[in-house]
Every structure is written in structure tokens, then in C-alpha cells.
Image: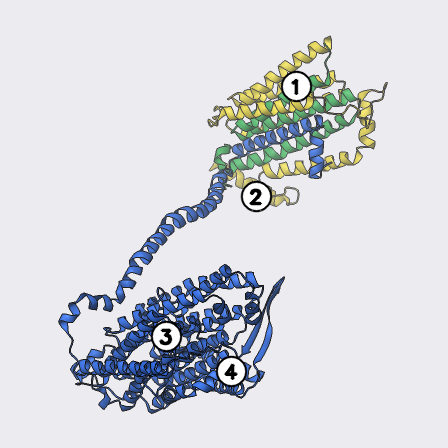
Chain colours: A blue, B green, C yellow
Amino acid sequence: MEFYLYLALFAPLTGSLFAALFGAKPKTLLTGIVTSSLLFVSFVSSSILLGNLLMGGKVVHVEMMTWMATGDLYIPFGFVVDQVSAIMMFTVTLVSTVVHVYAIGYMDHDKSFNRFFSYLSAFVFSMLILVMSDNFAGLFIGWEGVGLCSWLLIGFWYHKESASWAANEAFIMNRIADLGMLVGIFLVYWNTGTLQYSEAFANMKGLDNHILTLMGSFLFIGAMGKSAQFPLHTWLADAMEGPTPVSALIHAATMVTAGVYLVVRANPLYDLIPHVGLMIASVGAFVAIFAASMALVNRDMKRIIAYSTLSQLGYMFVAAGLGAYWVALFHLMAHAFFKALLFLGAGNVMHAMDSELDPFKMGGLRKVMKGTFIMMTLASVALAGIFPLAGFFTKDMILEAAFVEHHYIIYSVLLFTAGLTAFYSFRLVALIFHGEERYKLFGIHPHEAYKYMLVAMSPLLLLAIIAGWFKMTYFEMVTQLLPATEYHIHSVATYWIMTIGTQLFVILAIVYAYKKYQVAKQDAEFEKRLCYKILINQYYIPYLYNKVLIEPYRALSAFFWKSVDQKIVDASVDGIANIFYSTGEKTRTMQSGNLSTMLKWMVAGLVALLSLAVVFAIAVRYSDGVNPLLSGLGVQ
Amino acid sequence: MEIGLNHYLVLSTILFAIGLVGIMRRKNLLMLFFATEILLNSVNISFAAISHYYGDLTGQMFAFFVIAIAASEVAVGLGLLIVWHKRHGNIDLDLMSTMKG
Amino acid sequence: MFEAIAFYMFAFLTIAMFYIAVTTSQALYALTALASGMIFISAFYFILGADFLGAVQIVVYSGAVLALYAFGMMFFDTTRDIKEKQGNRYVVIGLSVLSALLVVVIFVTPLISSNITALYPIAEGVGNTQQVGMVLFTKYLVPFEVAAIMLLVAMVAGIVLAGKKMDLSLTLMSDAEIRTIKEEKTKKVLS
């Protein structure tokens, strides 16, 4: 079993290094094929490991080698495949394999084809380290690794200044959050004496509540950055500058879920501090409705889907915060499938529409792109949470959890957001695939994507449909590790009213969306309204960040550069060099070649030596005080 | 008044100082040689005086050798001076600065 | 008593002469002053009982060395006054005075230990010249010979540096060649 662990972990790394050899060369198809094959190997290994756990096998725990063993600190490179890791590995490798194959077609005409696959496989490797590690230090390594690869991939087309800027924004925001995470990790080590999960959580039970609150809060700050919760959320929408496969892999399925993974992994800690959990849930609920509101009016296809991701992450945090960790993980898995499918479908549309992103410029594409149409519609249905697709099971569980725990505010917020989710998803579908063909005005000739790309997307479609049906199998397996909180609504009637009511509300939203956007007209008066302006400018938060944080910081940096660095630091370094230079220049005149001057210098030297002799003689003469000094210097 | 060793030594020092002044002041190379002679002679006086007051002949021996060396130095020095004068037509120190740093 | 008078008189004279030698602007005056200074210094040697040294001083210095200087002066234009650059005279005087002061301080303060044993002690009853001879030719023989070689080298150097037409050797040429050279020289003079 350890063999499969190592295979799953290092196959993507091998692929990445292999592709890196071709990094500077023009496109060689071999890199795409080799990396995709190696990822498939990793997927098969992950499935074997998952199957092993489903059959009741043991958890696989290896310690590859020691990283640090200094004093009391012992950190190994250890990997564990327990129930949570296995689910994450399965999800990550599946989506990654699909995205790799898809990218062979998507990046077909890109001249940095090889570099792309190298970065993509490196990302998968980092993510696997993150989920497979058995201590906080390994988690942090993977954390940083995915941050780095995300930066590389968002800014993949680095010649575009907007892409570079977005990549920097993502990385810097992640870094800011990582500071919180580091403080959390330090607190864990300081108070429990170890960074290994099992031992740390065992030791936490005896700790003071105050310390635990701090620990949990700081770790959550790290999760906030990675999973783009408010206020560190602006990077996710801007990260759409990267190629669409990147958005599908990183910003839908894997990297942004690392925050949720962290909270799920640290569930023993969060179980001890339920008030922090409540705060997490509140933040999650707020983000859910916040992001959904911004997606309502947006005119950029990928951004709408990005806001949708943000909103669903909010759902996951609500679940994790309320203690329903297995529900959060389940939603994570299902969301990965249908969101990745949505993104890949959007990629097809983009390719067909010549990289056009405004859905108002598309329309009626279902005649030309049948496969994509079916996939995106079904993915949106799953996202909206219609029975019997995957989204229904997971989202409904979250709503139930909120209801049962008597958090009615969170429940109503999430319910309303579910309606909004359905509305904007189907707004997008209606604008793109239905109605008249507006793209003809812009002279675009769309065509369906390559067959193999559609074939690659099909596993995701399948899983988006059937994943919910495995809830019980999943539940039995996962609750061997996670707390098995079951949410039973006592009254059967309430349960059915809730479920049917939610479905009706969602279906109504879908119908309304279709009605409004089937014939797409841009409502000019609506656009003048204040609420529209606020929403389309993302509540002016990026503007605020720019004015309050970025501009003063830039001014401060400019000040430090010009006034401090140049005038003080550079000046002193130059000054020291100048001292040597000018001393040399001045003493050069001693060598004038004039014998008379040199004789004068000679006599001056003679006078100096004579005075030295007199001084030493006097010292010798009155040597009672000087002898100890001289013997101290080693002179007798 | 008893003339002691110190008197001779002070005299020697004064003559040495005068020689130093000449060395530093003179720009004509020949005059510089004169000043060198003064230096050597002042030292000879101190050697002889020390030899007398300590009853040791070593001082006088040293003085002999100094005289011999001074003589040969003058010979060679003047020879060089003549060659320089033939080549450049002057023996001014300030004009002989080809070894400028 | 006499010694004191003699010492102070000769001291004053020597200092005056050397001062003139150093500061005068006329070359001939400087040479003359130097010569007389040398003579007065030999007087000191006689006072100190170093007879041989005094005689050698007169013969070598006032005779040979100064004669050399006098011959040398014939090459250079001695009618002009020696022009000196206005170097900073305070520096010069200051440095010399300072060095003199320091040396005197070194000498006068009783730092030199007083138990110096004489290496070659002066014997009573023997004359100075004899004694010098005894020490010179036994203990200092090798330096003596080396000094002789050095003087030889100096002599050769002086000749080479100052000589003219050194490539011709009259002893090695035949009579015919000598005659042709003489005729060329006279021809040049006549024409």
C-alpha cells in the first residue's frame, strides 16, 4: 500500500520535471501526453487507496525521512492516507487528469505549451503534499507550493500586464494570510510541543480555552486567504486572467478548497472552540451571499463562475464551522466535479468565441455546440441543487445542519443564496446558449471543441450526476475519522416542507432567469441604478483597497527608496568607498618625484619615530603603572 | 666648567639639525651634497666623543669607516652629477621629477 | 679650563660655518664655509684625544673631498646665485628643531644604562695612532680590506662616469692609427 502512496505522490512530480526539460522549446505534444498519463497513474493509485479504505483496510501512514530533528523539535516528511486525505486525493487527481487532457486541446496553439504542463503537474504535486502530509509543517510546504504554482499559472501569459498584476495580487494576498497561518502553527507547536496531527490534537484537549481560540482563529486566517473569504477575496475574481484549465483546476476544485481541508483536518481543535466555529460559519454565510450578489450582474463569463465558486466556498465553511465536517468535505468533492465541468465548458465557449468573455455578445450557441451545451446545463443544474444531481444532496445537508442547530439567520441567508445561485447560473446558460445569435454581429464563427476534450470532460459530468448517490457509503467511511454528526429533523413534515420548498424556490429562480434572459436585452435604465453600480463594481472593495492600502504603500515605498535607500544607505556605502579613493588621491601627491619634498617627508618620519622612542622610553622609565598593561598585551 | 659627554652630544645634535635644514632646503643638488657632508661629520663627532668618554676605541673605528665611505660616496655622486648635467644642462631638484607618482 | 674655552670657541665657529654653508646663496661661499667647518671639526678630534682621526679628517675631508667638490664646481655655472624655490621655510625649520629637541631629550635623560663595558678599551701609555693601528689591523681587518675594495670601485665608477672618448685605447692601437687620429683632429681645428 505504501507503494501506491509514493506512486500517487511522485508521479505528478516526475511529469512536471519531464515537461520542464522541454520548457524553452516550442510545443511538443509528448509533454502533454506524458504528464497526463502520469497523472492518470496517480489517479489510479489514489483510487486504489480509496478503495482500500472503503473495504475497511487500514490507514496508510509512512514516514519518508526526517526533515528537522533539532532539540525538542522533530519534523519528519511523513505522509498519511486516511479517510479525509483519500477523498481529497481522489478528487484532486481526478480533476487534474481531466484538466490535463483538456489542456492538451485548449493550449493547442500556445507557444509555451510545455511550460504549462510543467507548472500544472507541479501544482498537483504541491496539492498532494498538502493533503497527504501528516504534520502542520508539511501542510505548510504544500500550502506555499500551491501558492507559488498558482502565481506561475495565473501569470502564465506574463506579457499581459493584467495577468502579472493578478498573479501578484493572488500571491500577496495569500502571503498576508499565511502570516496568520504561521502564527497559528507556532501556537500549535508552542502549546502542544509537536506538529504531528495526531499528537497535537491529543495534547490540545488539556489546553486553556483562550489559547485554543487564538490557535483556531489564526489558522482560519490562513484558510481565509487560500479560500478567498472576505476580506481577502478580491484575488479570486482577478485570477481569471489565467488560462481556463488553470481556473478549472485551481480556482474551482483544488487550491481554494485547501482552506476547507485545513478546517476539516483540524476538526478536533474546532470542536473544542465552538464559538470560533460559529464565527467561521458566519463569515462563510456572509461570503456566500456577498459573492452571489456580485455574480448577478456581471458581464464576464469566467468571473460569474468565479463568484459562484466563492459563494460555494462560503457554503463549505458554514458546514465546517457548524461542526458538520463530513458534510463540508462531501460538498467540496461534489462541487469540485461540477464546477470544474462548468469552467471547462466555459473554456470551450471561449475558444469558440475567440476569447470573448461577455455573454451578451454570445447567444444561441446550442445549435453549434451541442456537447458543451448539455454539459454546462447539467453542471448548472447540479450547482443549483436540483434532485437527483449531486448538488442537491450536499447543499441540502448544509441547509439542514444550519436549521437543526437553530442558526436560523444562517439558514435563511443560505436559502436565499441558493435561489440567487440558481438565478445567475441559468442567466449565464440562457445568455450563452439560448436566444438569438448575437455573435454574428461580431463576425465570430464558433465551432465545437475537439472530440477528445469532450470525452475528457465526460467523467466529470458522470460524477456530477451520480456523486450524491454514494452518500451513505461515503458517510460510513469518513466518519471513522470525522465526528459523525447526524442531523435529524425531528418532525418528518418539517423535513419534507423544507426540502420541497427549497426545490420549488430554486426552480422558480431558474424559470425567472430564463424568462428574463431568453431574449437578452440590456436594460439601460437598470444599469443606471445605484444597486447595479455597486454590484458591478464589486461593492467598490477593490477600489477601496487600492486607495487605502496600495497607494499609501506605494508612496511609502517610493519615499523609502528615494530618501532613505538612495540618500542614506547608498550614500554611506559610496561614502566609504569614496574615503578610500580620496585618501589615495591625496596621498598620491606625496610621490611627487621631487627629491626635496621626499627629503622633507623623510625628516618628518624621523621626527615621528623619535617621538615614539621618547614616549616608550618615558613609559619604561615610569613603568610601574605600565608593566601590568604591557604584560597583559603579551609584552614583557 | 667640566665638559661632559652631554655637551658633545648636544653639539652633535645641533650640527645634525643644521644638516637636516640644508637637506630640506637646498634645491641645487651640489648644495645637497654639502649638507650630506655636514650630517656625516656631526655623527663622527658624537662617535669620537663617546669613544673618549667611555674609553672604548670602537667609536673611533666607526668614525674611520664613515670617513672612508663618505669619500667614496662623494666620488660616485659627483660622477653621476656630471653625467646628469651633461644630459640636461641643469642640476635643479625641482626639474628632476620624472618619477612622479 | 682650557678645554672648556677651546670647546666653546670651536663649537661656535663650527656651527657658524655650517650655518653659512647651508643658507648662503653663493656656491663658492658655501664651499669655503664647508671647508673651514671640516677643519674646525678636526680640532674637536684633537681635543678628544683622537689624534689619528683628526689627521685623517684634515687629509681626507678638507683635502681630498673638498678638492673633489671644487673640481666638480668647475662644471657648473657658479657665477649665478643659486635660486631656491620658496618651499615652506617654517616647515623646514620646525621639523629640524623638533628633531633636534627630541634627540637631545633622548640623550640627556638618564635612560642609557651606565654599565657599558668597553669592547676595545684604550690602554694607557700607548699613543693613539699606535693603538688605532693595533685594533684596526687585527680586529677590524676584514672591514678594512672591504673598504679598500669599495674605494677601488668608487674610483672606477668615477672614471667611467666622467670620462671622455673611453672607447679608444691608445695602448692597444698601432702607431699608424694614432697618427691618423691626430691628423683628423688637427684638420678639424684648422678648417
Q: Residue at 27% of width from left, 77% of height from top?
A: A419
Q: Is residue A460 above or below residue A608?
A: below
> Observer-nearest residue: A535 or B7?
A535
Task: Compute the Cα span from label 1 to label 2.
Answer: 62 Å
Q: Chain of mark 4?
A: A
Same chain? Circles 3 and 4 = yes
Of circles 1 and 2, the one toward us is 1
Kind of residue sitting beneath label 3: Phe
Same chain? Circles 1 and 4 = no
Q: What is the x, y in percent for residue A606?
A: 61, 31
Task: Compute the Cα span from label 3 to label 1.
Answer: 118 Å
Of circles 3 and 4, the one toward us is 3
Q: Residue at 53% of width from left, 60% of height from top?
A: A208
Q: Are marks 4 and 2 in contact (CB under 8 Å)?
A: no
Q: Secondary structure at mark 4?
A: helix
Q: Residue at 39% of width from left, 89% of height from top?
A: A466
Q: What is the x, y in percent for residue A98?
A: 40, 85
Asked whether residue A470 is in view, the answer is yes
Which residue carries the number 2 mark? Answer: C180
Task: Compute the Cα span from label 3 to label 4.
Answer: 40 Å
Q: What is the x, y in percent for residue A446?
A: 24, 86
Task: Compute the Cα span from label 4 to label 2.
Answer: 112 Å
Kind of residue sitting beneath label 4: Ala
Q: How many tags in the picture? A: 4
Left or right for A566, reference C58: left
Q: Secondary structure at mark 2?
A: helix
Same chain? Circles 1 and 2 = no
Q: Which mark is residue B11?
A: 1
Q: Mark 1, residues whose alpha carbon is within 10 Å: few (<14), some, or many (≥20)? A: many
Same chain? Circles 2 and 3 = no
Which residue carries the number 4 mark? Answer: A8
Which residue carries the number 3 mark? Answer: A403
